Amino acid sequence: MAAAAAGGGAGWRVAPGRAPALMLAAAAAALGFLRISALDVKTPEELFVENGTEARLPCTFSSSEVISSLASISWSFQPEGATTPISFFYYSQGNAFPTKDTPLKNRISWTGDLNKKDASVSIANVQFRDNGTYFCDVKNPPDIVVKPGEMRLRVVQRVIVSAVDVKTPEELFVENGTEARLPCTFSSSEVISCATSVSWSVQPEGATTPISFFYYSQGNAFPGKEAPFKNRISWAGDLNKKDASVTIANVQFRDNGTYFCDVKNPPDIVVKPGEIRLRVVQRDNLPAFPTGMVVAIAIGVTLVVLLLVAVIVCVVRKKNSKKHYSG
């Protein structure tokens, strides 16, 4: 105490080196008291919408704070070629305030739910002039928004969508222990692109749901490792030839079941996947006359019959001509 008095100070002294530590502790305490964190706003980067339809602009967010009456949503729009965005919608305390002096007037509506952290809006009767960049800004104090959600809206002409037609044989008999090629072909009005993909699944006999076991996209095959035939499946198709076939090596009786071939080639849609019933049998139980052989035999018999008819006609004609001259 005498040392303190000698120093001429009536208060406490801070030991050298402890001042920075105390300052950090005070700052941490202040931050802990305020509990300020960042709002994370999410939107798709790009959205394609058909001209004349309704466009839902999805926007979701996460916040550490409870949604309160202070929470609000602001939407703005920067048309293509413009340098600054235009505010066109505001939502707060259950009330929507669409701006009337924008190209979107009378066409904008609230489709979100703040309690579900959804800040989406919809635009009716989308026009080509609606193309541009849209910003979704969410405020939920004391959390702060680091960056608003941003999406590029692209309004396009009506998309003509047709169906992908997938074809497979109804039934396939394969000898136990051999290799089975599951044929699958398809037709599509669209050019084969990097978006084209093939999925195979199987529903084993007695099962109620199919199991996915193979996926092919962009030149890469992804066989499922948990399927009954893991390490036995391989790609045997060629998408450029519209062939989506696969091969199963060393077929077992447990491989019996129904196989589904699903081909996607956007924007074409698949109405129904191809479906094959695989029957694994002993060699002696294979069908005695495969379809190809039956067809070949039928053609051969037909040709023989036609030949016999031709011979008979020729013989009859010769006999008739001899009688005519002898008469």
Image (cartoon, rainbow, N blue to C red):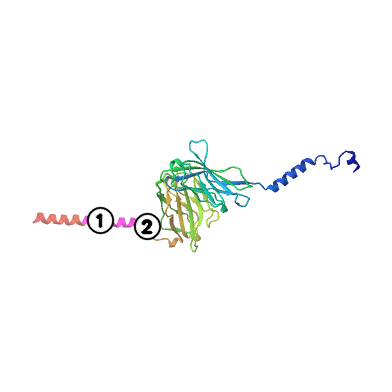
Q: Which of 39 and 301 is in front in this view?
A: 39
Q: Where is residue 8 in the image (x, y as percent from the top left)?
A: 88, 38
Q: Position of residue 72 (x, y in %)?
A: 57, 48
Inspect the image, locate mark 1, and give the three-letter code of the amino acid beneath it.
Answer: Leu
Residue drawn at point x = 17 percent, y = 57 percent: 316
- Mark 1, residues whose alpha carbon is within 10 Å: few (<14), some, or many (≥20)? few
Q: Where is residue 81 in the image (x, y as percent from the top left)?
A: 48, 35
Up/down of 251 relative to 89, above or below: below
The residue stretch that appears in magenta = 289-311
Locate the C terminus by quadrant. Answer: bottom left
Q: Is residue 307 magenta?
A: yes
Q: Which of 72 and 183 is in front in this view?
A: 72
Kindly state the secondary structure of the residue where label 1 is placed.
helix
Kindly state the secondary structure of the residue where label 2 is placed.
helix
Q: Nearer the viewer, residue 125 or 257?
A: 125
Residue 177 visible? The answer is no
Q: Distance between the residues labelled 2 and 1?
A: 23 Å
Q: Is residue 191 rendered to the left or right of residue 223? A: left
Inspect the image, locate mark 2, and give the three-letter code of the amino acid beneath it.
Answer: Thr
What is the residue that sits farthest to the bottom in this orientation? 206
Q: Position of residue 293 (x, y in %)?
A: 36, 56
- Mark 2, residues whose alpha carbon is within 10 Å: few (<14), some, or many (≥20)? few
Tell me, for residue 291, which label it has, or none.
Answer: 2
Mark 2 vs 1, N-terminal side: 2
Tell me, for residue 306, which label it has, or none.
Answer: 1
Q: Is residue 76 magenta?
A: no
Q: Which of 213 and 79 is in front in this view?
A: 79
**Which secondary structure type mostly characterizes the magenta part of the structure?**
helix
